[in-house]
């Protein structure tokens, strides 16, 4: 796998030069994950940003984790899948930006997932050394977070519209 090319094709680093992508590749660690393998758990610490180089991951909220990284049963452990991410997409940006605990859990849903983990301190160091690259990365992170907010708004509004439609339909009967 050409890590620099995977970096350039990602949503966070898509507009970097080849030289800049190679710089990011030099601080990236390749991580392989199997089917249903937990990448990180909601509430855990960690600030790495991940790029899905190959495979599929799910971002989810809720649900207790067992030792084999599958969800336990029970209403209190219900999981809500927030996003399904594929090659080129990223996750972990929120903890990278605000240094807080992880807001959601992430697991691999394919048996051949390859992730690129990027250390936040090393990334910031490279951005300080190359402000133009830093500008592009920060702009891409802002775009990614804006997209997440827009999707959350649409889901919230969709739920509100659905609730209103159901309520209106019930009033007619």
Image (tube, helix red, strand yellow):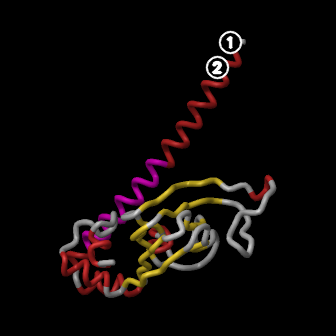
Q: What is the secondary structure assignment of the residue under circle 2?
A: helix
Q: What is the secondary structure assignment of the residue under circle 1?
A: helix
Query: Is residue 62 toward the left or the right of residue 84 in the image?
Result: right
Q: Which percent across, then down, holds residue 95?
A: 50, 72
Disc 1 designates what residue?
Answer: 172
Q: Is residue 101 visible?
A: no
State the quadrant of the N terminus: bottom left
Q: Which percent across, then down, holds residue 138?
A: 32, 69
Q: Is residue 38 magenta?
A: no
Q: Is residue 1 visible?
A: yes
Q: Which percent across, then down, holds residue 140?
A: 32, 64
Image marks 1 and 2: residues in contact by CB distance under 8 Å: yes
Q: Is residue 83 above or below residue 138?
A: above
In percent of the image, x 59 and y 79: which residue is there?
45
Label 2 neighbourhood size at 10 Å, few (<14), some (14-19), many (20+)? few
In percent of the image, x 54 and y 69: which residue is there?
111
Depth order, front residue of 31/77: 31
Q: Is residue 76 above or below residue 107?
A: above
Q: Which residues are magenta?
A: 135-151
State the quadrant of the C terminus: top right
Residue lying at the far front in this picture: please name it.
111
Report, in whole angstroms, how far the alpha carbon at label 1 lies from the one at label 2: 6 Å
Q: Which percent across, then down, holds residue 116?
A: 41, 77
Q: Give the image quarter of residue 130.
A: bottom left
Disc 2 designates what residue?
Answer: 168
Res. 79 mark:
none
| Number of marks drawn | 2
The kind of secondary structure the magenta stretch mainly shows is: helix
Depth order, front residue of 34/168: 34
Label 1 neighbourhood size at 10 Å, few (<14), some (14-19), many (20+)? few
Depth order, front residue of 166/116: 116
In percent of the image, x 55 and y 67: which residue is there?
108
């Amino acid at each position: 796998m050409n890590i620099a090319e995977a970096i350039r094709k990602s949503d966070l680093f898509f507009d970097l030069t080849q030289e800049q992508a190679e710089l990011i590749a030099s601080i990236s660690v390749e991580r392989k994950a199997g089917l249903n393998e937990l990448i990180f758990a909601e509430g855990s610490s960690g600030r790495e940003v991940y790029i899905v180089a190959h495979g599929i991951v799910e971002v989810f909220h809720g649900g207790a984790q067992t030792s084999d990284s599958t969800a336990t049963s029970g209403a209190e452990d219900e999981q809500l899948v927030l996003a399904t991410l594929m090659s080129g997409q990223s996750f972990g940006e929120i903890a990278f930006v605000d240094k807080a605990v992880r807001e959601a859990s992430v697991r691999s849903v394919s048996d051949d997932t390859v992730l690129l983990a990027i250390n936040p301190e090393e990334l910031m160091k490279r951005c300080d050394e190359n402000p133009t690259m830093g500008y592009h990365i920060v702009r891409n992170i802002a775009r990614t977070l804006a997209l997440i907010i827009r999707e959350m708004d649409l889901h919230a509004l969709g739920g509100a519209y659905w609730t209103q439609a159901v309520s209106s339909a019930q009033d007619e009967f």
